[in-house]
Image: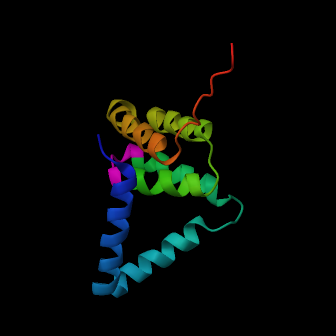
Amino acid sequence: MTDYVTYHQHLEERLSQLGRELPGPMSGFARLHKKAVEEGALNARIKELMALAIGITVHCDGCIAYHVHDAVAAGATRQELLETIGVALMMGGGPASIYAAHALDAIEQFLPEPSLVAVGG
C-alpha cells in the first residue's frame, strides 16, 4: 500500500527541484494550476474533487495524492470524497475501480476517521 502522505511530501520536494532546474515550464504549469483551482463560479473544493475524479480515471497515483490532499485542505468531507470516487468509477469503469481503492487509501491517510469513543456502560 502506498503511503500517500509521504508520497505527497516526496512529490512536493521533486517538483520544487524541477521548478529550480526547469523554471520556465514548471512556473507556467504552477500558474496554470493556481488559476484553474482559484475561486470562481466553482469553488476550490469542487475543483479539487473534479481533479481527483480525473486522476482516478487516468490512473495517476501522484494525482490522487495531490488532489486528495488539496481537497481535504479545501474542506472536502469524507462523503464528498467518496461520491467523487463514485463519479470516477462511472466514467472509468474497471480500471478506475483499482485506482478508486488507491484513492480510498489516500483519503484515510489524509482524513482519518475520528476515533470512536466508547460510552460507559
Residue 72 screen position, x and y as percent: 57, 52
Q: Quadrant of the N terminus?
A: top left
Q: Taking 106 as reference, is 10 above or below it? A: below
Residue at 48% from the left image edge and 49% from the top image edge? 52
Q: Is residue 7 magenta?
A: no
Q: Taking 49 as reference, is 33 above or below it? A: below
Q: Nearer the viewer, residue 106 or 51?
A: 106
Q: How is the image coloured?
A: rainbow
Residue at 70% from the left image edge and 65% from the top image edge? 40
Q: Where are the magenta residues, as a range?
A: 56-62
Q: Nearer the viewer, residue 71 or 28?
A: 71
Tally the numbered discs: 0
Residue 66 screen position, x and y as percent: 44, 57
Q: Residue furthest front?
A: 121
Q: Is residue 59 magenta?
A: yes
Residue at 33% from the left image edge and 50% from the top image edge? 61
Residue at 68% from the left image edge and 21% from the top image edge? 119
Q: Residue furthest top?
A: 121
Residue 116 screen position, x and y as percent: 60, 28
Residue 15 falls left or right of residue 66:
left
Residue 79 falls left or right of residue 51:
right
Q: Taking 103 as reference, is 31 above or below it? A: below
Q: Quadrant of the C terminus?
A: top right
